[in-house]
Image (tube, rainbow, N blue to C red):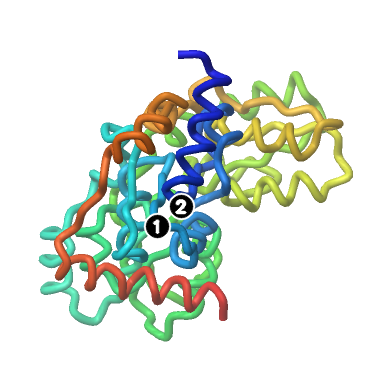
Amino acid sequence: MDQNFMIEEIIRLKKEKNAVILAHNYQIPEVQDIADIVGDSLKLSEEAAKTDADVIVFCGVHFMAESAKILSPNKKVLLPAIDAGCPMADMVDGESLREYRRNNPDTTIVCYVNSSAEVKAECDVCCTSSNALKIVKSLDTKKILFAPDKNLGNWIAQQVPDKEIELWPGFCITHERVKPEEIEKIRNVKQGVKIAVHPECNPAVVELADFVGSTAQIIEHISNSDDKEFIVGTEMGILHTLRKRNPEKKFHLLSPSLICFNMKKTSLEDVYNALLNDKHEITLDEEMRIKASKSLTKMLELSKG
């Protein structure tokens, strides 16, 4: 199908169905360009909660579409690529957290938003990489379990030494692939060029970086910097936004391994088919959704405070 025709049809169907298209920063450029809102998990969670659209087309992975449904139960939430999952989210499950809580009743469970609705229903509060530090600092408890990302949890733990943070052994398979040697190698080639990385990277990589932050924080940091060249250590999809916002600056990907194949599964045709045929609708058990909404709502409240 002709791409221009497909774009016209997406725009027409979106208006006809009162739909909004949300796309994560890691999506392919064509999908980002057709979206109404592009952002990181926090921004997209906030937009999903306040949109007045009848239909949310979520160009991301499964847990993101679930989060949108948790916050907007009366809206139709569509995930264009139904097989777009998240290996990190699969590294923790609800039963494991229930068992943990039985054995550790005095520990507050903080769950990264990169988790299933079932897991969100078992935690006390959610967080994103943008607001994790703020969320953890705001808690009046000393003992915390951070799940499922041990790397993000470790980065947070380094900044709140007054709290006892236990780390779940999960990780992002994309960010985990980056090696410290890659930083050392690129520094020799690009001497003096600043390196910005995501806290989902291994602690040994994070320690060598000049700036550490979520996708949104990396974009803001680079956009506000006077430097004209950067090395970026997060999923390659962010480069599209960086180049659009900073056409006068140069960007280099820290590692060729920084490609999330799940984030790349959504095509323009998938977005078109989602709008045309209501594919693929996300549904949740209502009792679980209500439990999960408490942890997400608490996150949104604390991130504003």
Tell whether 104 sits left or right of 14.
Answer: left
Q: Label 1 amino acid?
A: Asp
Instruction: Locate residue 93: give its quadrant.
Output: bottom left
Asked if the residue under mark 2 is in contact with the one under mark 1, i.e. CB atoms within 8 Å, the reply is yes
- Where is residue 171? Give x, y as percent: 36, 43
Q: Quadrant of residue 246?
A: top right
Tell me where residue 167 appears, x and y as whole percent.
33, 58
Q: Compared to 262, does 137 lie above or below?
A: below
Which residue lies at the image location 32% right of the left edge and 39% below the top edge?
A: 86
Disc on res. 264? none
In the displayed image of the protein, which residue is found farthest to the top? 1
Viewer-side residue, 254 vs 224: 224
Q: Which amino acid does label 2 sit on?
A: Asn
Q: Is residue 161 above or below residue 12?
A: below
Residue 87 visible at all: no
SS label for mark 2: loop
Q: Which of marks 1 and 2 is nearer the N terminus?
A: 2
Identify the residue under disc 2: 18
Viewer-side residue, 123 vs 285:
285
Pointer 2 local density, CA inside 10 Å: few below 14, some 14–19, many at least 20: few
Q: Where is residue 132 in the image (x, y as percent from the top left)?
A: 49, 64
Q: Mark 1 points at which residue?
A: 54
Secondary structure under the numbered disc 1 in the rendered image = loop
- 120 or 140: nearer the eye? 120
Q: Which residue is drawn at 14% across and 58% down?
A: 96
